[in-house]
Amino acid sequence: MKRQTAPLAPHIQIYRPQLTSVLSFSHRVTGVLLSAGSILLVAWLVAAAAGPHSFSGAREIVHSPGGSFMLLLWTFSLFFHLCNGIRHLIWDAGLGFNLRTIYLSGWTVIGSSVALTGLAWLVSHILAR
Amino acid sequence: MPPRGIRSMLSLIVGRDEESGSRRVRRVPVIVSTSNQQPRVTVLKRFPLPRDLGVSAESRIEPGRTWPAPAGAGRVKAFEIYRYDPDSGRNPRLDRFEIDLDQCGPMVLDALIKIKNEVDSTLTFRRSCREGICGSCAMNIDGTNWLACTRLIAESTQPSTIYPLNNLRVLKDLVVDLSHLFAQYSSIEPWIKPKSAAPEKERLQSVEDRGRLDGAYECILCFCCTAGCPSHWWNADRFLGPAVLLQAYRWLSDSRDESPGERLDQLEDPYKLYRCHTILNCTRTCPKGLNPGRAIAAIKKLLIQRTM
């Protein structure tokens, strides 16, 4: 029996994750998370406008372990998307395409987005006192 | 020379040469400088996705058979190789070949030829020049695309996994159907398109003008980059892919070509050119050390510049 269609060679199923592709996928994923997070931000603002009772409910959700984790994820997404977005702007200017520069800027994005997330949380904890 | 402790910490970032058998192999975990460098640390060998996610029924890979090393083999190396026989009516499978490295040449292509000569003569793959200039033996080796003839066995993982070039229809084993990619290549009209009258002799070029083609003319059309480009995986029908766009830039840069405007008109398309999202897997994988990512950015710049 002869087969009708030839198989398609595997791609994402077997291709090695590299800094190049991992950061690109992460940029897309953090962009989606930020869009979802902006809806929650609006919900929080609506709760604040609706009065002290609904605001304290929203506050409880934000301060719960699950809420804090989502806030942390959202903060990281914000800084990662910002830093990697600047990296993309530099590329759009036609700069930074040496492979070594691509890797240096990629690791710089990871380092600075982790550092900025930490800084934002540190500052917010100091201000909350 | 910095002290030993600092040196070993530096080597974690910029990598170091390692002895592997009689050969020196450059392994780099963090900062990759050239596309031939292999990672030393593997966090994930593949993306953590189900193996059959979005894979059509005829493309699912089944377990294959094992061909054990001969008795008394010295250094045994295993290769897991994608197999597909169009006449069998069966799905593709992954066969395991164990070979004796003491009886084998140094390159992955040597191992494939040894398997075909001595173990299973039905193993099918393209090869010709065995020195990285014809581009025939491009395949996915240990998860990234490279030429089998210029990849050292010493640089490969144990077991080493070998698949055909990604996202292309498989004709047999490691031989894929490249017709679509060559059709995309011919769509950019890869030849000089003059407007002026033909000169008496050849069209001359200054040394500087000729220099503008450096980094583009060396492409051997092995399609390692296009097959490794996620944007091309999702939009292979309409996105031209890095190899073809690098060639589009090569003809835009040629001082003898007199139709750059028409070429740019053809490229100004949300799919043909702008599906490139600067992932840069192309630059990471090019076995000739070229930079398709930079060439695509240069085309985008030309398109913006002509509107200003």
Image (spheres, grey):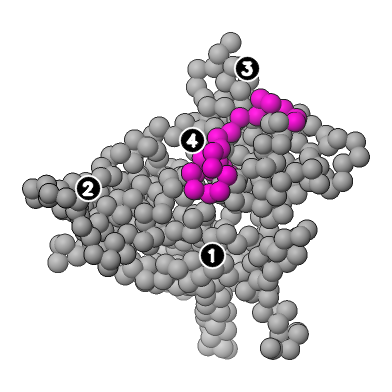
Give the label, 4 or 1, closer to the camera: 1
Q: Is residue B195 magenta?
A: no
The answer to whether A107 is drawn above or below residue A13 in the figure is: below
Determine the CA span between mark 3 and mark 2.
46 Å
Give yes or no for contact between labels 4 and 1 (Cβ–Cβ under 8 Å): no
Q: Is residue B183 left or right of residue A125?
A: left
Q: Residue at x 51, y 33 (%)?
A: B176
Q: Secondary structure at mark 3?
A: loop
Determine the CA span between mark 2 and mark 1.
32 Å
Give yes or no for contact between labels 2 and 1 (Cβ–Cβ under 8 Å): no
Labels 4, 1: one chain: yes
Q: Which residue is mark 4?
A: B168
Quadrant in the rendering for residue B240 = top left
Q: Of B243 and B106, which appears nearest the observer?
A: B106
Mark 2 residue crowding within 10 angstroms, few (<14) / some (14–19) / many (20+) = some
Labels 3, 2: one chain: yes
Give the mark nearest the N terminus, 2 or 1. Answer: 1
What stretch of residues is rendered in magenta?
A: B118-140
**Which amino acid, by three-letter code, is at mark 2?**
Ile
